[in-house]
Image (cartoon, grey):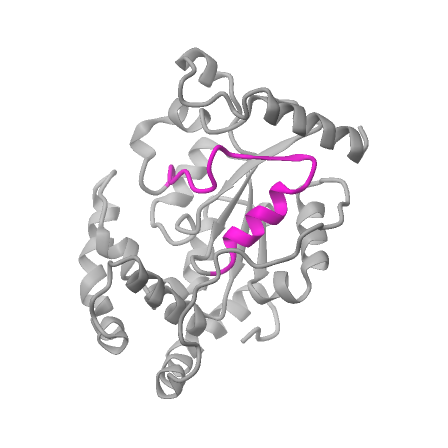
Amino acid sequence: MNIVDLKIKKVLHRLLGKYVYMKSSDAYHSIKPLPDFLIIGTQKGGTTSLYNYLISHPQVLGAAKKEILYFDYNFSEGEKWYRKFFPLLARLRNNFLTGEADPDYLYHLRAPERIAQTIENVRLIIILRNPVDRAISHYWFEVKGGHEKLPIYEAFKREEKRITEAKRRILAQQNYYSFEYEHFSYLDRGKYAEQIKRYWAYFNPNQILILKSEDPFNHSQNTFNRITDFLNLQNYKLQNIKPYNVGKYQRRGYNNLRESLTEFYEPYNNELYNLLDIDPWW
């Protein structure tokens, strides 16, 4: 099927009720597909932009919403609940793929095992951002959301105390939720090597594509081609290359903080480069 035919079929699918979701019976949901791919992180790394680029492809049907939060915060709802967010048309595997994006999946301690138990052959896409920039962006995101009241230096200083007990409980209790772990893990999320190792414990590295956050915006089409090749999709030229969900905050300043964070992350970044056998990214 050529690109034009796929576009027409995708439009017709949307006109016929989008995903016929939520109000349908459990029996209907049970025959809906599980995702073919997941964009699993990192938070504030460009997952929203990447997801929007990908669902613009004629062969890709998005979920009913970008972040279903199943493998982190809604796993107790069960697989049938999860399936209802995906389009039935995507069962035609030779023509269409479907997937979702949740930047918490990379970081959540239980997500790799849960994903492996549910969708063994899924393709995983990771996009990593300079951890210094990511941490600062994350802080301002939480301030904007009304979750963070502390000054940035104090928030970073108190992070370990805030999240250490939460991490222990998440591992000890199947469905434990921690507000602090979700919202205040500014520095811990930038320790990428340990997060990738958790996924490598459950998935073949060939199932995982790891990208640098800066690349989709500096080399959008080239990066997109890598993704379509990874997912075995037809070549497709991006029509609208723009960043989505860009945080608005004062990006200048923080010189002393940036120097401190750069020093803090040096061993973690080196661990990442050695793990992936790549030249330094940041």
User: Is 67 colored magenta in this rendering?
Assistant: yes
Position of 112 relative to 45 (above/below): above
Is 276 positioned to the left or the right of 186 in the image? Answer: right
Number of numbered discs present? 0
Quarter holding the N terminus is top right
Tell me the quarter of the picture where residue 87 sits: top right
User: Is 154 colored magenta in this rendering?
Assistant: no
Please tell me which residue lies in front, 151 or 172.
Answer: 151
Q: Going 72% across and 40% down the picture, which residue do you hit? A: 233
Is 148 positioned to the left or the right of 221 in the image? Answer: left
Quarter holding the C terminus is bottom right
Query: Residue 147 location, x and y as percent?
Result: 24, 58
Please tell me which residue lies in front, 110 or 145.
Answer: 145
Q: Which residues are magenta?
A: 45-71
Please tell me which residue lies in front, 12 or 155.
Answer: 12
Residue 90 at least partly seen: no
Q: Going 20% across and 66% down the picture, which residue do you hit? A: 149
Is 237 positioned to the left or the right of 117 in the image? Answer: right
Residue furthest front as drawn? 15
Q: Going 22% across and 43% down the picture, which residue do you hit? A: 176
